[in-house]
């Protein structure tokens, strides 16, 4: 099966609703694409206007890209110390993979009956190189295999990173 690297960058959010009664907003984003989720760091400084500029790499099946069927969910949460993190809002969309550039969309709350914006989210995405993913024909679940292969690829990338860091230490 063919897949592609899919780079997704979460830049910032503006005008988010302050969901805290006490304390300050410390917001992070959870990005979910192709069955995988990744998180930004918590912005401890900018409160209701967080900035992350965090780039993620996902692996997306080529057939989803051709059909322009790449669904993304970006959820925003406020980090709290003594209880569960508080939901701020989210953005659900189908990405157009061949589009390049920055996008701004309204963040909505799915726990509200009101249809009003809870701020805006700025992000960008771009396609990377095509890769060939070899599937094990003995398994009946192709999507499970795809996730397993992605885990192996991520492990391989982590090994390369560690190897590079060790090489740097040894040469200094």
Image (cartoon, rainbow, N blue to C red):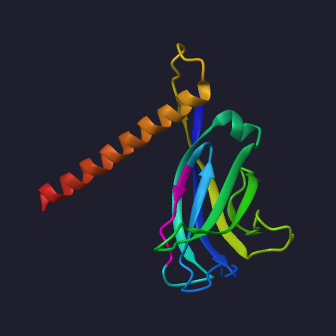
Task: Name the one closer to the observer, 93 or 27.
Answer: 27
Where is 55 relative to 151, above or below? below
**Which of the 4 image quadrants contains residue 22?**
bottom right
In the displayed structure image, the side of residue 101 where residue 159 appears, left or right: left
Residue 94 percent location from the top left of the image? 76, 51
| Residue placed furthest toward the front | 82
Point 75% across, 67% down: residue: 109
> Where is residue 41 drawn, in percent x and y?
47, 68
Q: Is residue 81 above or below residue 71?
A: below
Question: Residue at coordinates 75% horizontally, 55% vertically from top-left?
Answer: 93
Q: Nearer the viewer, residue 23 or 155?
A: 23
Specify whether residue 62 is painted magenta: no
The quarter in which the N terminus is drawn is: top right
Between 108 and 169, the one lying in front of the other is 108
* Picture layout, residue 66 above or below residue 16: above
Q: Which of the 4 image quadrants contains residue 35? A: top right
Please give the name of the residue rendered at 53% of the width and 78% of the height, measured from the top-left corner.
Answer: 26
Which image quadrant: the C terminus? bottom left
Q: Residue at x 52, y 51 (%)?
A: 57
Find the magenta span and give its range. Answer: 37-43
Q: Is residue 103 left or right of residue 76?
A: right
Q: Position of residue 120 (x, y in %)?
A: 72, 74
Q: Nearer the viewer, residue 81 or 1?
A: 81
Q: How many marks?
A: 0
Q: Quadrant of residue 160?
A: top left
Q: Is 161 placed left or right of 61 in the picture?
A: left
Q: Is residue 74 above or below residue 27?
A: above
The verdict on residue 40 being magenta is yes
């Amino acid at each position: 099966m063919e897949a592609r690297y899919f780079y997704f960058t979460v830049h910032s959010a503006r005008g988010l609703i302050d969901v805290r009664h006490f304390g300050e907003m410390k917001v992070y984003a959870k990005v979910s694409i192709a069955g995988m989720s990744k998180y930004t760091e918590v912005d401890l400084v900018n409160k209701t206007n967080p900035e992350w500029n965090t780039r993620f790499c996902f692996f997306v099946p080529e057939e989803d890209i051709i059909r322009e069927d790449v669904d993304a969910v970006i959820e925003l949460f406020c980090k709290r110390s003594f209880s569960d993190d508080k939901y701020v809002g989210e953005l659900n969309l189908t990405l157009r993979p061949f589009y390049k550039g920055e996008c701004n969309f309204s963040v909505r709350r799915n726990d509200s009956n009101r249809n009003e914006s809870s701020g805006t989210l700025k992000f960008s995405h771009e396609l990377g190189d095509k890769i060939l993913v070899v599937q094990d024909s003995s398994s009946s679940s192709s999507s499970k295999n795809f996730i397993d292969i992605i885990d192996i690829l991520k492990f391989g990338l982590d090994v390369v990173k560690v190897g590079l860091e060790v090489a740097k230490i040894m040469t200094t």
